[in-house]
Amino acid sequence: MTPATPTQTTPTRTPPSSLALDRALAPVESESFLAEHWERKPLVVPRAEQGRFDDLLSIRDVERLITETGIRTPGFRLVKAGATISGYTSDLAWRPAPFTGVADVRRVLDELEGGATIVLQGLHHNWLPLARYCRQLEALLGHPAQANAYYTPRGSQGLPAHHDTHEVISLQVAGEKRWLVYEPVLELPLKNQRYHSALGAPGEPVLDVILRAGDTMYLPRGWLHEALTSDSDSLHITVGVNVRRWIDEARSELDLREQELHFREAIDDGEPPELPLLDAGAVRRRARERFVRSRRPILDGQLSELLALDEVTAKTPLVRRDTVIADLHGTTLVFEGRYLRFPERLAAELEFVVLSSGPFRASELPGTLDEEGRLVLVRRLVREGFLRRSEPGG
C-alpha cells in the first residue's frame, strides 16, 4: 500500500554535513566548488598525500575482495581498452541452486598481469566505508551517489575516451594515473546519451594531468576523458552523482496526466490537450520526497542494537545515525522508505532527534513525555534504525 503523501508544509530535515565533500576538495571550499565548477568545468586538486583515502578502500582491500571473498558479478568486472574479456568467472555447485558468476581467481590474476583493469562496482551497496561516504555526499547534494573502484596495472589503459552521464569525483588512492580530458561533444548528456563516435571525435586535450595518491579530480558529466597508468599500479575510486534533471520531472508530470482522457485520445484535427507547466516548488518537493524515501538503509551494527534494546535507559547516550536522511512532516517521520506516524503531542521530541548532531539521552528530550514514554520513543527509533547507542557495548 502506497503511503499518503505528507502535507505540503516545510519539513524539518536532518542537517547535512560538508565533511565528505570537503575531504575530497580541500583546500578548495565546497561553496566555491558548487558555485564555480559543479556542472560547469573540471577541477583538479593536487596533494600527493599518500594514504589520504586508504580508509575508504586500500589496495589490500581490493586484493582481499578479489582473492578471498568469492566475489560475484556484477560486483566486479574486467576491462581492457580495445578488447573484450570473458571467461573469468565460474559457477560453484550448491543446492538448491549454484553460486553463479564467481570470480575465477587464477584467471582474474592472469588477466590482470596481461593489462586488464579490475572494476569493483556498486561499492556504495556492499562496502561500508564507501556506503557511508556516499551517503554523506547525498545528504549535502540532495542527489543519489554511487562508487566504483578501478585497479589498473602499470602501463595499461582500462577504458578508451568516453564521457559519463553523471557527475564524477575521482579519488586517487594509490599509484599514479595520467588523465587526458577533452571538451564535451554533448553538454550535460542524459542517462541514455552515452558517448559514441558519431557524436564527434575528441579534440585537443584541455587537461593533461597526472593524479598521485591523495589527489582529486572532478569532471562534470559530458566531459570526455581517458586514463593511463605510468610505471606504477593505480587504484582510484570514482564517486558518481546521479543528478535529478528538470527533464526527468517534466516526464513525470506528463505521466501523471495519463489518467486524463484527453491525453489518451488519438491525434486528430482538434486542439491538443494543454501541456502541464512545471511548478518549481512542487517539482522540488516531489524530487526531495522521492530522494528521501528511496535511500537504502545502512544498518551496520543493527543486530547488536536490537539485542541490547532492553538495556537502553534514560541515561544511555544515543545518537542519530549519520547515514539517515530524513524529513519530518509534522509528526510523520519519513526516511528509507518508511513513514512513521506519531501523535501530534510528540512534535517537540521528534524535532529534537531529527535535528540532533551529537549524543543525547532520553532524559534530555524536550516535551511533556514522562521517563517511560521517552524510553518507548527512543527504543522505537533504535528499532527502526534511526537512532543507535553512541557507545555500543559501553
Image (tube, rainbow, N blue to C red):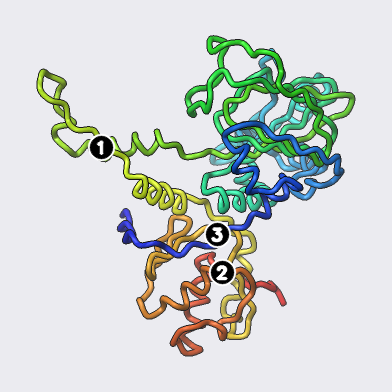
* Up-down relation of residue 266 to residue 284 (above or below): above
Q: Quadrant of the C terminus?
A: bottom right
* Up-down relation of residue 354 to residue 60 (above or below): below
* Residue type highlighted by circle 2: Leu
Q: Residue at x 74, y 26 (%)?
A: 117
Distance between the alpha carbons at the discs numbered 3 and 2: 9 Å
Rendered image quadrant of residue 226? top right
Q: Residue 50 location in percent, x, y?
A: 87, 43
Distance between the alpha carbons at the discs numbered 1 and 3: 34 Å
State whether residue 38 appears in this view: yes
Residue under label 2, please give it: 387
Residue 278 relative to residue 184: left or right: left
Residue 171 relative to residue 198: left or right: right
Q: Which mark is residue 350?
A: none
Mark 1 or mark 3: name the one nearer the start of the chain: 1
Q: Residue 230 location in percent, x, y?
A: 86, 24
Q: Secondary structure at mark 2?
A: strand
Q: Quadrant of the N terminus?
A: bottom left
Q: Residue at x 57, y 17 (%)?
A: 185
Residue under label 1, please give it: 276
Q: Residue 164 location in percent, x, y?
A: 59, 27
- Toward the viewer: 13 or 40? 40
Q: Which mark is residue 324?
A: 3
Distance between the alpha carbons at the discs numbered 1 and 2: 41 Å
* Residue type highlighted by circle 1: Pro
Q: Residue 20 location in percent, x, y?
A: 67, 51
* Residue type highlighted by circle 3: Val
Q: Residue furthest left?
A: 270
